[in-house]
Image: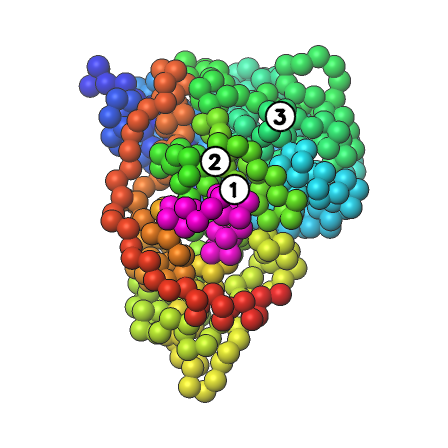
Amino acid sequence: MSDVTLVAGVDSSTQSCKVVVRDLESGALVRSGRAGHPDGTEVDPAAWWAALQQAIESAGGLDDVAAISIAGQQHGMVVLDAEGRVIRDALLWNDTRSAQAARDLIDEVGADAYAERVGVVPVASFTATKLRWLRDAEPANAARVAAVALPHDWLTWRLRGYGPADESPLGPDLEALTTDRSDASGTAYWSAATGAYDFELFERALGRPGREAGTAGDGVVLPRVLGPADSAGRTPSGVLVGPGAGDNAGGALGLGATEGDVVVSIGTSGTVFAVTAEPVADASGTVAGFADASGVSLPLIATLNAARVLDSIAGLLGVDHDGLAALALEAEPGAGGVVLIPYFEGERTPNLPDAKARLHGLTLATTRPANFARAAIEGMLCGLADGLDAVRRVALAGERSREQRILLIGGAAQNPAVATIAAQVFDAPVVIPSPGEYVADGGAVQAAWALTGTRPTWTVESAAPLAVDTRAIIREQRRVYVP
């Protein structure tokens, strides 16, 4: 094994930390590990650091690994003081307390101006709105902020040996903070089109001026933005550290998605994104003009209510996921008129942070477990299908976009009912790649890229496309109830 070079990728997601170790040449999986994260929409980042170390140990350690890169959940607000200490628990992407802050920022700047300047319009998920919330709700904490990082930025910094003086060998060097373009584009104060921070928008959010790490002057430190093949540095033991990425960009990289591909991911959140050559600006705020991790763009919509909708309804019906699938496939398309609007935790797309879930169309004849099960899956998928329509409208021109395959990934994609119903909801060939940790795999691709200077050509096997089926009954019926 001495002549084999290994690289590692990390997925530090909302729910857990996964590590994969792969062969540099073939991309073959050598070993893997994982550790859990705490529940909640605000989390002490120390829990992520402990989970990363545990997952690395579970994956056999890094002693024989040449390079590593961390992909992670987007948007989370990690604020540090001058000593490199976390000031308060991080607010995660799915924390909606900053919904009013998003509305305030739009009122002050304008949706059109935001879309033009940074490719996104603020919603509660984005980092800028969480900083505005911090400014307004916790001014004492806001005054202490010396640096702002995203989850993967902070973990990369800690992995390289930085942190509070009593916890790290290299101490609290905030100038060493780095990020990548995909994660930076989810802050609402960095532009994929210009490749630069918009410091006026940052100051409008936090109420304090900012500057990029490594540049002269005063101001709150924002991580230096790295390119796809750049290295963030090395760990104290000498392992090369790649730039990292936001989770969706990491997933696209791990899948090998290329220009024109559309990915639908069903995890804690639901996402629909495409790989496009040019940046996107949607003044409606529906499609976020994110950057990807390879140097192009990743226009994206996200829903807060995805796989957990299925968890909830399965629990209500007293079945596991296999039982939910069996019930759903007993029902006819349209679930006999039973419609679930699945906004259990508010919603991001459409932007309804205070919305609640609703069940419609019940009669004595249709109030059956099978219809409930099918309505849950249809409701979740129809929300993503509406997002697919928006991505097509903004980023994928022409009827050819309806011929493009849809890569369906995430834990719920392996549910046979989800796969079957997806082919009835999406009007394009649905392809389900072989199960894998695509986000962590994207980190491994980055690690290999930073190590060699060349993007590897590993591929993910996929099954044959599922047949396209009609979506009219399901989609049109649901639209009657959407606010």
In contact (CB < 8 Å): disc 1 and disc 2: yes
In contact (CB < 8 Å): disc 1 and disc 3: no
Which residue is denoted by mark 3 in the rendering?
194
Name the residue rendered at 67%, 23% in the picture: 221
Tell me the magenta residue range.
384-404
Which residue is denoted by mark 1 in the rendering?
395
Amino acid on which disc 3 is placed: Thr
Q: Judge from the rendering whether residue 307 lies leftward or rightward of residue 213; answer left or right.
A: left
Image coordinates of residue 158 in percent, x first then y, are: 52, 24
For mark 2, give the secondary structure: loop
Q: Examine the rendering and report whether any part of residue 214 can be seen.
A: yes
Q: Quadrant of the N terminus?
A: top left
Q: Judge from the rendering whether residue 102 lies leftward or rightward of residue 470; answer left or right.
A: right
> How far is disc 2 from disc 3 in space, using C-alphas?
16 Å
Q: Quadrant of residue 217?
A: top right
Amino acid on which disc 1 is placed: Ala
Nearer the N terminus, badge 1 or badge 2?
2
Residue 370, numbered label: none
Name the residue rendered at 32%, 41% in the picture: 436
Name the residue rendered at 71%, 44% in the picture: 111
In the rendered view, would you say 424 is above or below 210?
A: below
Q: Nearer the viewer, residue 340 or 323?
A: 340
Residue 276, numbered label: 2
